[in-house]
Amino acid sequence: MSVAPRGGNGKVTIPEILSRKSLSSDVSHQPKTKITCLTAYDFPTARLLDEAAVDILLVGDSVGMVVLGYDSTLPVTFDEILHHTRAVRRGTQRALVVADMPYGSFHVTIEESVRNAVRLVKEGGAEAVKIEGGERRIELIARLVEAEIPVMGHVGLTPQSIHALGGFHVQGKTADAAQQLERDACAVESAGAFSVVLESVPRDLAARITEKLRIPTIGIGAGPECDGQVLVIHDLLGLTQGHKPKFARQYVDLSSEISRAVASYCHDVRSGDFPSDAESFHSTAALRDYLRGSALAKQRT
Ligand code: KIV
């Protein structure tokens, strides 16, 4: 299941992602190309995003809400993430595949959490895992890194903490909350993560954290100063129903396109316009003889 990166073939690797960090100490003062990250949950979408040169495909636990119909990410199981990671792996050649550790898969013991992460790499083909949480995850992140599993952190609005946070709200809005968020991001870095997602964080605070860290920040609702951006692919494609956060820019309205196409199909079937003769298979001379023969025999009886 795993893909071994070979130098020079364009494969996005962890060192490549790290090299995309904009550091003020960089003497070249060349702005770095921003990191692009999108969620993907299945083979055809992974293939399209990979061919479009997206850097990181995240098999997010958002799969629970946008694909499986749950009302939060909490019910998503480890087996569901493993299943979707395997599909994304099969569709991906160039991008870095990161699998989200779902709620419950890293909350019991460190040993069980490492075992689960190892399965995502070994059986799912993930090249890294994503873990929600800051200071509380220092030991786990360090143990995963020790087990050769690259970790993407995730701080700010962490949807797995939805009950504790009391809803999907912007985080870090008071001085105390901002200081905690900075501590969380620094903790994730010092534990050995190669990048960190900043979700729903005021732009200025995200810019300050980005300036402070030596690993890339990947923003979602965290403003343009982050080293990269991530969106849920269903939001970008206009496939999400109901409320969409203001940062979720929609690039196409695929829901309307799909509804139009399906309505046309139903109309064509009902009117007899589909399938046409050109869309049908035709009989051979032998089959025609057989059909004629059995029709004659039927007439005689
Ligand atoms: O699950 C997910 O899609 C995520 C991204 C929004 C960062 O965690």
Image (tube, rainbow, N blue to C red):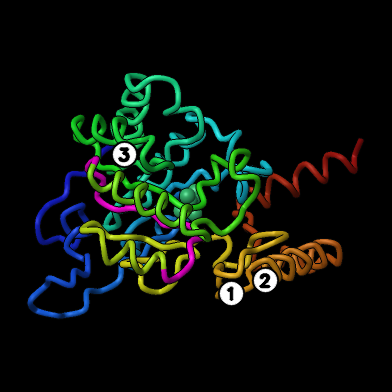
Foreground mark, 2 or 3?
3
Q: Which residue is mark 1?
A: 252
Label 1 with label 3: CB-CB less than 8 Å: no
Residue position for label 2: 257
Q: Report the mark closest to the observer, 1 or 2.
A: 1
Q: Which residues are magenta?
A: 191-204
- Measured along the vertical axis of the image, is residue 164 above or below residue 172? above
Instruction: Identify the amino acid type marked 2.
Output: Glu
Q: Earlier in the sequence, mark 1 or mark 3?
A: 3
Whether label 3 lies within 8 Å of ligand 1 gets the answer: no
Q: Is residue 40 visible?
A: no
> For the point 68% across and 52% down, which residue is it?
288
Residue, disc 3:
125
The number of callouts visible is: 3
- Give the answer, above or below, for where 50 lies relative to 24: above
Residue 293 locus on image (x, y percent): 75, 44
For marks 2 and 3 on the same chain, the one whose residue lies earlier in the sequence: 3
Q: Are marks 1 and 2 in contact (CB under 8 Å)?
A: yes
